[in-house]
Amino acid sequence: MASTATESDQKKKPRPTYTPGPYSAKLTPEDHRELLLQLYLARYFDVRLIKEKKRGRLRGTLYSSHNQEAIIVGSLFGLKPEDWISPIHRDMPAFFMKDLRSGWRNPDRMGMTVQEVCAQVWGRATSPGRARDNWSHIGSKAKHIIHSTSMLAGTIPAACGVVYADRMNGGDAVCLTFNGEGSTAQGVFHEAINFAAVHKLPVVTVIENNQWAYGTPAELEYSLEDFARRADGYGIPGLIADGQNVFDVYDKISEAVEWARAGKGPSIVECKTFRAYGHGDHDDDRAAKYRPADEVEEGRSRDPIAVMKKLMVEFGTLKPDEAKEFMAEGKGASEVTNDDFPPQVVDYLSEGVEFAVNSPEPAAEEGGMWVFKEGH
């Protein structure tokens, strides 16, 4: 029997490169577009700051999240506003992207403003830290963001305490902690995960496996291929996500969050990705020597924005012509321009940058503030 036209078309239609999971399958076309915009926003934050430093308008060390944006966006997208997050230095956009679905300029949303975060980067008096640090050592109890520190994995026990207290007060908040794969070798990582497992605390530990712990390659960090297997010794789930695919990150994090919120305890989600640049911009030249050029090229070959666009075209939520409108993917900070990003992304972040640039530095008299208890 001859095939009908419909059957013939179906046979010719290529198979999708990714089958949506149970959570991403429920996302709407509007959700898809918001996710893509947020990927652009996280990328633009990164490249804009690099450009500002080269222009001489910014000092201090920058820690790039370039090529790892799908982890930030996919992890945050499914959280409730009252959930907690514990970002690290490579997740700087997370501070202002938390609860972004409630409205980018909504003053009541459960996330910092882009102005606050940019002021922190610029070390201004309008920053949460009032210029005591120019990067991620900030937090907000009101916005449910645990203060970031340089002691990687050191925020996991703090996360345990936060959600333990929340449970005792009748809440159901979950906390996401972000950690590089190198931090899993720290003793505090294991102590905290064990404590969370014993007490079934709703802590989801996100391992951003970008293949390098500063200058140490992953094969010299751990004897197994998957860092998610760290979970096995504690009897908790260890999930693996494609860190370049925002849908897969969203699915795996949502699964872990649902598990935690149901009272079943913690889990580990390993997101496999690749660090585009050095550990920080102070390490860029050195990283070009300790990492082979072909490895860097391969690691950056699956740009999260490009992966997202391709899948949206396959899902029918983005037209092929639309996918060619803003081509930020595959370009470094020196190559990309504002025209490679949607105007609303450029405008939003520019508000934060200009606020920071035009904010005053704190007075010298503030040098002793918060060092000693006032009045004693």
Image (cartoon, grey):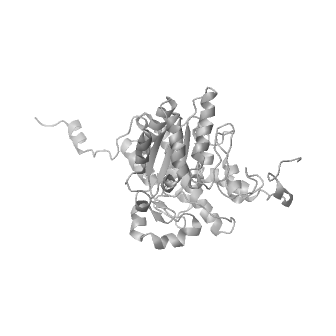
Residue 70 position, x and y percent, is 48, 49
Relative to residue 280, is residue 80 depicted above or below? above
Residue 331 position, x and y percent, is 48, 63
Q: What's the residue at 41%, 51% (across, down)?
A: 307
Quadrant where the image shows the N terminus: top left
Residue 195 position, x and y percent, is 53, 39
Camera-nearest residue between 4 and 238: 238
Seen from this angle, which residue lies furthest left?
1
Relative to residue 114, is residue 221 depicted above or below? below
Report which quarter residue 296 is drawn in: bottom left
Q: What's the residue at 80%, 53% (across, down)?
A: 371
Seen from this angle, which residue lies furthest right?
375
Report which quarter residue 58 is drawn in: bottom right
Q: Can residue 245 be seen in this view?
A: no
Residue 158 position, x and y percent, is 62, 43
Q: What's the residue at 27%, 44% (across, down)?
A: 13
Camera-nearest residue between 300 and 222: 222
Number of marks present in the image shown: 0
Camera-nearest residue between 275 and 37: 275
Camera-nearest residue between 30 and 153: 153
Q: Is residue 6 visible?
A: yes
Q: 311 left or right of 139?
A: left
